[in-house]
Image (cartoon, rainbow, N blue to C red):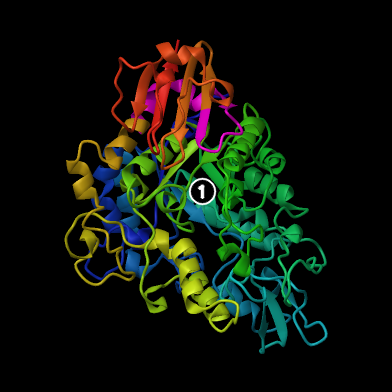
Amino acid sequence: MRKRWWKESVVYQIYPRSFYDSNGDGIGDLRGIIAKLDYLQALGVDVVWLSPFYASPNVDNGYDVSDYCDILPEFGKMADWQHLRQEMRQRGMRMMIDLVANHTSDQHRWFIESRQATDNRWREYYIWRPPRDGREPNNWQSYFGGSAWQFDPTTAEYYLHLFSRQQPDLNWENAEVRKEIYRVMHWWLDQGVDGFRLDVINLISKEPGLPDAAVTVDGPYQFGGQHFQYGPRLLEFLAEMKREVLAGRDLITVGETPGITTEQARAITDEENGFLNMVFSFEHLGVDRNPRGVGKGKWQRKAWKLSELKQIISRWQDDLHERAWNSVYLSNHDLPRPVSRFGDDCRYRDESAKMLATLLHTLQGTPYIYQGEEIGMTNVRFPSINDYRDVDTLNFYRQFADDQRLDRDEIMAAIYDRSRDNARTPMQWDGSRHAGFATVTPWLAVNPNYPEINVQRALAEPNSILHYYRQLIRLRKANPVIVYGRYELLLADDEQIYAFTRTLGETRLLVVLNFCGAESEEMGASGDWRLPEAMRDGQLLIGNYPVDPAVDPRRCRLRPYEARVYRLG
């Protein structure tokens, strides 16, 4: 396997609106990011991924772009972006930016022109269709609920929007659209970016004819992913993007690719002839969710098993090893906080956050940290729907508030569990008012637990989650086996312990994680609990509890959410 800098890097995602407000308007901005670069450098990250900062009406917080080559004024000016890029370079950090290429805002000049007339030159930049029997052209459902089609009275036709109605899908069948996107990419590369995170990039190719989706649930609209999640021309479009933009450049590229398989991921990221460095897969994050990924289904929690999570992660580790490359992540701007989702955000918050971090940083793949994850930020429970800002959350509430099968408490419980605003509450910098994020009321309220969970407090506590993240990042950089070593799962069927080895040449590591809030059985017991004999003489590299070196680790019981990493032999 080729050694590449982006394989050895750790990426930190910033959601600019919620990171740090430098000018007192309650909104994070580019100068706020500059003010915190020393913090990121001390953490040890190599790449900073910026969520959209482009001009936008902010229906979907910047993922509805109205001008790809301009800065949203509340974030700053182009000079601020250039200053940020310069300051990052001085600290040896690279910048990756979001590219939203599947759709634009309905306020983008292309769409404003497109909707004027059926013979307008920009009409084919988007996907327009006449009504079918007086209704939508097909039965596809939007990811945000309701129909994926919006009627426009100006020309009496519908346009496709897989997300909000203010986010019309671009027509990638049109060569001019593709050229426009490539021009945008070249423009940002000329400004000095080091790579792209390609938003829902696997949705850009739709099946010709836009056929109806299979009916799987009651209601007029159905999930149509089989017709657009890995469309017939996807690889052709990505090959063209590589040829026209990416080839010959030393970049980091990651595609957001909901719903794809390991086989499809290999085709996109193959070490020899793929098109992107890596993709974000979502399969491991579906273990606790209803199998249907849109509408009400995605808000419904289901019981999950650790063995299922291990099976999914292991398949991605095994299927991509020496053929492609994994991204490794547990959170981002669209997901609930991992310590609230897979750990214990109350009694064992510190322990479970560290355990999850150990998993994140010891798997094969580039680790992605989302802002606040490194201090153990948790989900939020706002008292009223009026406190929420996320368009998807508000759509869900409006759609089901009058549903006889869901009362208000059920709806709010789902929002507490799943809302994207869980990840978007402002970064908690200190214990002062508004968590040190702003001096005025922020655009979204801070989590009320900020006096206990904040960066200032974490820096002052030697055993904090933040310092543990720093140790993990240093450990990964000092041990090539963590980056390039072969992964092998142990105890596949155990529902409490996640254990695996990493092997590179003569170097072998053992990772043992307790995913439970109770002690494990003795690790040296017979049967399924057998762990490598070499563990007895292994060197403990890191752990989230104090460990007595005189005690044979094979005779111990793992404490609640305990994590240990050993060098064997």
Q: Is residue 131 magenta?
A: no
Say few, some or many: other residues with alpha carbon within 10 Å of mark 1 (under 14 / 14 to 19 / 20 or more): many
On screen, residue 264 versus residue 363, left or right, reads right
On screen, residue 411 versus residue 547, left or right, reads right
Residue at 38% x, 16% y is 552
The image shows residue 371 at horizontal and vertical percentages of 36, 51
Residue 254 higher or lower than 103, as above or below: above
**Residue under pointer 1:** 196
| Residue 274 falls in image quadrant | top right
If the image is split into quadrants, where does the C terminus sit? top left
Amino acid type, label 1:
Phe
Residue 403 higher or lower than 505, as above or below: below
Residue at 50% x, 21% y is 525
**Which residue is at the front of the view, 8 or 109?**
8
**Which residue is at the front of the view, 489 or 420?**
489
The image shows residue 528 at horizontal and vertical percentages of 58, 25
Q: Which residues are magenta?
A: 473-499
Q: Is residue 59 visible?
A: no
